[in-house]
Amino acid sequence: MTITDVAGSREPIYAFGSKLREIVPFVWLAATHTVGIAIFSCDGGVTFGISADSDETPDLEVLGQRHRARGWRDRTSPCR
């Protein structure tokens, strides 16, 4: 498992005059790791990104169920 956290700006971030509305953090899986969790804070908010090898982590859905039970938004996009 790889876990990383990044403290972003405490102030809003702008690009070309538009405020950044959302960041989706991502961490690449190391050669022998099957789950990666990235945590990013910015402008008073915190977002989580989870990447995993679903073939090697059969109970990965449990993490998603806990995520949804807390009322967090789910932006699942499985890749195969």
Image: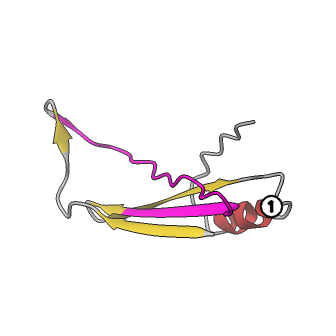
Of residues 9 and 53, the one nearer the viewer is 53
Q: Is residue 74 magenta?
A: no
Task: Kindly identify the residue that appears in the image at 25 percent across and 60 percent down.
Answer: 43
Where the C terminus falls, by quadrant?
top right
Q: Position of residue 69 (x, y in %)?
A: 69, 67
What residue is shown with label 1? 57
Q: Main secondary structure of the magenta part?
A: loop
Q: Could you tell me which residue is drawn at 57 percent across and 60 percent down?
A: 72
Q: Quadrant of residue 68?
A: bottom right
For image coordinates 80% across by 61% down, the residue present is 57
Q: Is residue 48 left or right of residue 66?
A: left
Q: x and y percent of residue 17 in the render?
A: 13, 32
Q: Is residue 4 left or right of residue 33?
A: left
Residue 35 coordinates in the image, percent (x, y): 66, 62
Q: Quadrant of residue 52?
A: bottom right
Return the x and y of residue 3 as percentages of the image width and height. Answer: 52, 69
In the image, residue 29 sits, relative to residue 19, either above or below, namely below
Residue interval drawn in magenta: 18-40
